[in-house]
Each structure stands twice: as structure tokens, then as C-alpha cells.
């Protein structure tokens, strides 16, 4: 029974392992951060994968910030988001279960106890990913207002980073 309690405590402590706060930047070894792909000279796809402590709004803001940075670096003034998707994936959590069994083999008998299983999302986190595709533009922005001023985005969102 003593070993069972030690095992349960170890599983509980392992579940407390968290992904720490993340700063804005390119994707790290765990895949958190931004990745971008140039599709055409004025068209880019940006993916931002947030750590488990980032709300979906922050993940989407960081994707927009990267779009603003690319726009300025390429000599453009504004960008239009032509495709957008934000999704979440539940990961981690604690799994605890118990089993008990006995057996008799002639004059000997045995008892077995096991710990394992899955409790789903108890202690788990949602990891959000934002994917946007942007079209870059120069000069006067479109009349319809469906655009982002790159410098304003970098100043506003970048100022919070």
C-alpha cells in the first residue's frame, strides 16, 4: 500500500508540470511561436502556436504582429487578412485509475494492484493556434476599410510584448 501511495503522489506531481509563460518570437524546439511562409511576393501564411497559458486572443494578436513585421520588412504599408482560423487542442492532464486482482496457484496465492488510466482533461490545458493568410499592399489603403496598417499593428501589439 505504501508503494501505491508513492506512485499516486508521483503521478500527481507529474501532472503539475506546466508550460511556462511564453514570449513572442519564432517557433522554438517545442513548436511554440510563429512560423511564416511566403506564398507569392505579396502573400504570406503565418501560423502562431501559443503555449498553454495563452488565451486565443493573444495568439491571434501575435499572428497579426508577425504579419505587420513582414509587411514593413518587405516595404509594404498595410495588409489584408484573406483567411483566418483559430483552433485549440486539449493536452496534458492527470490520469489515475486503480485495479485489483487475485490468483491462487496451488498452495500459493497472489494479489495485484495497478494504477493507471485517464481522467481526460483534469489538469490539462488548451493550446491555441492561429493561422492567417495575408495580402500585402502599398500606398493608400483600400476604401472598404478591411485592412490593417502595419506600423499601427507593430506599435500597438508590439508595445504590449
Image (cartoon, rainbow, N blue to C red):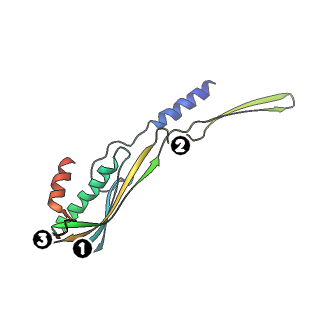
| Label 1 – label 3 distance at C-alpha | 16 Å
| Residue 111 to residue 78: above or below | above
Mark 2 vs mark 3, CA separation in Å: 51 Å
Within 10 angstroms of label 1, few (less than 14), some, or many (20 or more) residues?
some
In the figure, 25 relative to 42: above or below?
A: above
- Left or right? Give the position of 140 relative to 64: left
Quadrant in which the N terminus appears? top right
Q: Position of residue 23 (x, y in %)?
A: 28, 48
Disc tally is: 3
- The x, y position of residue 110, in whole percent, is 77, 30
Residue at 21% over, 66% down: 79
Residue contact between numbered discs 2 and 1, judged by CB atoms under 8 Å: no
Residue at horizontal 22 percent and vertical 70 percent from the top: 136
User: Between residues 83 and 33, which one lies in front from this camera angle?
Assistant: 83
Q: Can residue 92 be spotted in the picture? A: yes
**Disc 1, SS:** loop
Tell me which numbered mark, 2 or 3, is placed earlier along the sequence. 2
Determine whether 9 is above or below 129 in the image. above
Q: Is residue 16 left or right of residue 152?
A: right
Name the residue carrying label 1: 42
Q: Nearer the viewer, mark 1 or mark 3?
A: 3
Q: Nearer the viewer, mark 2 or mark 3?
A: 3
Q: Residue at x 47, y 44 (%)?
A: 92
Q: Which residue does the numbered mark 2 point to in the structure image?
A: 120
Q: Quadrant of residue 65?
A: bottom left
* Residue 29 visible from this viewpoint: no
Q: Residues within 10 Å of mark 3 (few under 14, many from 20)?
A: few
Q: Which residue is mark 3?
A: 140
Nearest to N terminus: mark 2 or mark 1: 1
Amino acid at each position: 500500500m505504501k508503494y501505491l501511495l508513492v506512485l499516486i503522489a508521483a503521478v500527481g506531481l507529474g501532472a503539475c508540470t506546466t508550460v511556462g509563460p511564453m514570449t513572442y518570437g519564432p517557433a522554438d524546439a517545442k513548436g511554440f511561436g510563429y512560423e511564416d511562409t511566403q506564398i507569392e511576393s505579396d502573400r504570406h501564411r503565418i501560423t502562431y502556436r501559443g503555449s498553454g497559458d495563452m488565451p486565443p486572443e493573444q495568439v491571434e494578436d501575435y499572428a497579426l504582429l508577425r504579419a505587420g513585421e513582414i509587411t514593413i520588412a518587405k516595404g509594404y504599408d498595410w495588409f489584408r487578412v484573406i483567411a483566418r482560423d483559430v483552433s485549440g487542442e486539449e493536452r496534458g492532464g492527470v490520469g489515475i485509475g486503480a485495479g485489483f486482482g487475485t490468483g491462487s496457484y496451488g498452495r500459493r496465492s497472489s494479489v495485484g494492484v495497478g494504477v493507471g488510466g485517464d481522467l481526460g482533461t483534469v489538469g490539462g490545458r488548451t493550446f491555441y493556434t492561429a493561422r492567417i493568410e495575408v495580402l500585402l499592399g502599398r500606398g493608400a489603403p483600400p476604401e472598404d476599410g478591411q485592412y490593417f496598417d502595419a506600423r499601427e499593428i507593430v506599435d500597438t501589439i508590439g508595445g504590449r510584448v
